[in-house]
Image (tube, rainbow, N blue to C red):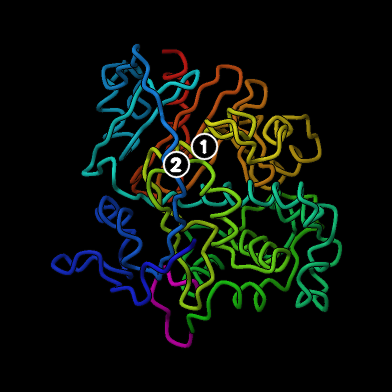
Amino acid sequence: MVKQVTNEPSRMVNSQLKIGQANWDDPDHLGVSQLSMNRLFRTVALETSGPPEPLPVSNRPIDILSLEFDDPLMAGRTIDGDTFLNRRLYNDALLVIHNGLTVHESYRNGMNDTDHHVIHSCTKSLLSMVLAIAIEEGMLDPANEVTDYIEEFRSVDAWRGVTLQHAWDMQAGISFSEDYDDPEADYWRYARAAGYYPTLEGEEGIGVEAWVLANLTTRDHLPGTVFAYNSSLTIVLGIILERAYGMGLAEILETKLYGRVGPESDGLLNTDAQGFPIVEGQLSLTLRDFARVAQLMVNDGRSRSGDQIVPSGFFAELLAADPSGTSAYHRKHRDEVFPSGLYKNHFWIVEPEQQQIAMLGIHGQFAWCDLTKDLLIVGLGSYPKQDSDLMMSVLKALWNRVSEA
């Protein structure tokens, strides 16, 4: 069962270099801080149960380090895969599974196969799978309004008409700015309340549950009309899951999902100071355990041992034509890298025509799959910016090149 790992974190990753809570995401600190998030937060362990599911290795590996890539920074030039991963993607670890067999596994930037690396917003997609399980079990209904589950929002006009599905697709219309380049964005106030960074004068580290209940109170758009990325909505979904099951969110994640995929190591889930799991971005996994969870995407929700964990058809349904969802996705900001893309059920549908789905997290975390080719690529990274079109273009180039190989 879930166990406490860190009660009172040190708030310091490297005392000699003064790498801690205030500066963990400086670009030159990411290589160590993202392997050490349990030192910055209270942390609970999602425990393993039983022997790990094997990840059999192919006798025909792919030498990605020697592949030739078009250089995304210098048009007309090519670079080898080693340079591409190190100097363009700032990748820490990469694993490729084709037809159920591992064809590539590599580590760099100081990471090794036993390190736990934070997967950032890929955590959202894991919570999404649990939400799908809860719906299949009859615990939740995506057509119900959020206020059916969270009574504190019933007196808030902004939440009228917002369904669970709207929040799941990030089309709730609730006011929230998540512009990482804007220091005044709502995201940074939320992040300080969560414990990502020290609070500013006049602020309190009230925790994620209290923050969303107190601050998600106004509306920018009618629900279902505009996609607006909003990490705090994942906390809303987490609150709903806790209240539906009557148990802690970490225990739900462990018993319904993580403990069932056959991991070889505990998952390290950070919580706020009040103990609520930060399920929008603070789960740390080994590369292989991340791949074990991600394989559910290409196995129709089944583990390698055949256990149906996520409802059958869930991932295929993400690829179904959704004109209103596509319109909402592009209405506010046109996606130039993935012009036919879509965000649905906390997953990124990057190329629906090619049946390509992805989990994505800041600084270059991803799990990408091509269902037509039974191909899964999982990566952990330390890209110096949280997000950018260039980073997404580099990821797209990696996925396409490996797919060709």
Where residue 16 appears, as percent x and y from the top left, is 13, 67
Mark 2 vs 1: CB contact within 8 A: yes
Q: Which residue is mark 1?
A: 294
Q: Quadrant of residue 288?
A: top left
- What residue appears at the point 37 percent right and 40 percent down from the top-left corner? 287
Mark number, residue 390:
none
Where residue 284 appears, as percent x and y from the top left, is 41, 53
- What residue appears at the point 47 percent right and 88 percent down from the top-left corner? 202
Q: Amino acid at mark 1?
A: Ala
Q: Amino acid at mark 2?
A: Phe
Disc 2 and disc 1: Cα gap in Å? 6 Å
Where residue 186 appears, as percent x and y from the top left, is 56, 68
Callout 2 crowding tier (Cα within 10 Å): few <14, some 14–19, many ≥20: many
Q: Nearer the viewer, residue 353 or 44?
A: 44
Q: Is residue 109 left or right of residue 189?
A: left
Q: Is residue 175 left or right of residue 197?
A: right
Q: Per the image, is 201 magenta?
A: yes
- What residue appears at the point 42 percent right and 41 percent down from the top-left corner? 51
Where residue 373 appears, as percent x and y from the top left, is 55, 17
Q: Is residue 115 left or right of residue 207?
A: left
- 173 to 291, vertically: above or below: below
Q: Nearer the viewer, residue 38 or 260?
A: 260
Q: Nearer the viewer, residue 220 or 255?
A: 255
Q: Residue furthest left?
A: 16
- 401 to 395, vertically: above or below: above
Query: Main structural element of the magenta stretch: helix, strand or loop?
Result: loop
Q: Which residue is mark 2?
A: 290
Q: Range of the magenta residues?
A: 194-203
Q: Callout 1: helix, strand or loop? A: helix
